[in-house]
């Protein structure tokens, strides 16, 4: 429905019987849950080359004897 498609009709019309406000609210909750709505948008994937995470720091690669060099002398 667009902006120009507005009507003055209610979204639900009772044809027979007298429903309480709680029953109408329960019916609307079931109908809106069954409709499903829109699917969430898929997250956008960035390429590894465009990612800024790799610029923050280089990975830690300890070499031989690194455990001894990390100690205080």
Image (cartoon, rainbow, N blue to C red):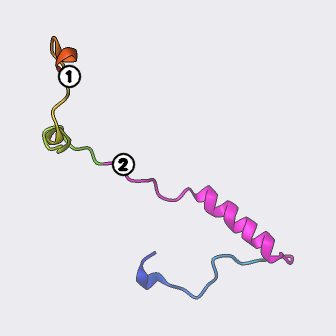
How many numbered circles are shown? 2
Q: Residue at x 76, y 72 (%)?
A: 24
**In this rendering, would 52 be left or right of 38?**
left
Q: Position of residue 2 (x, y in %)?
A: 42, 78
Q: Nearer the viewer, residue 49 or 57?
A: 57
Q: Does residue 15 belong to the magenta stretch? A: no
**In this rendering, would 72 be left or right of 28?**
left
Residue that numbered label 1 is attached to: 70
Q: Position of residue 45 (x, y in %)?
A: 26, 44
Q: Which residues are magenta?
A: 16-43
Q: Does residue 31 belong to the magenta stretch? A: yes
Q: Position of residue 57 (x, y in %)?
A: 17, 37
**In this rendering, would 1 be left or right of 28?**
left
Query: Which callout, 1 or 2, points to the residue nearer the camera?
Result: 1
The quadrant of the rendering that contains the C terminus is top left
Q: Residue at x 62, y 58 (%)?
A: 33
Q: Residue at x 63, y 77 (%)?
A: 11
Residue 10's place in the image compared with 25, above or below, is below
Q: Residue at x 86, y 76 (%)?
A: 17
Q: Position of residue 40 (x, y in %)?
A: 43, 53
Tell me whether the residue at label 1 lies in contact with that at label 2, contact meaning CB atoms closer than 8 angstroms.
no
Residue 49's place in the image compared with 16, above or below, is above
Identify the secondary structure beneath mark 1: loop
Identify the secondary structure beneath mark 2: loop
Q: Nearer the viewer, residue 55 or 42?
A: 55
Mark 1 crowdedness (10 Å alpha carbons): few <14, some 14-19, many ≥20: few
Residue that numbered label 2 is attached to: 42
Q: Residue furthest bottom?
A: 8
Mark earlier in primary sequence (1, 2): 2
């Amino acid at each position: 429905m667009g902006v120009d498609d507005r009507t003055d009709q209610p979204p639900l019309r009772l044809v027979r019987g007298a429903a309480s406000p709680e029953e109408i609210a329960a019916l609307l909750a079931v109908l809106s849950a069954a409709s499903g709505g829109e699917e969430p948008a898929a997250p956008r994937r960035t390429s590894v080359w465009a990612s800024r995470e790799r610029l923050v720091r280089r990975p830690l690669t300890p070499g031989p004897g690194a455990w001894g060099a990390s100690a205080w002398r």
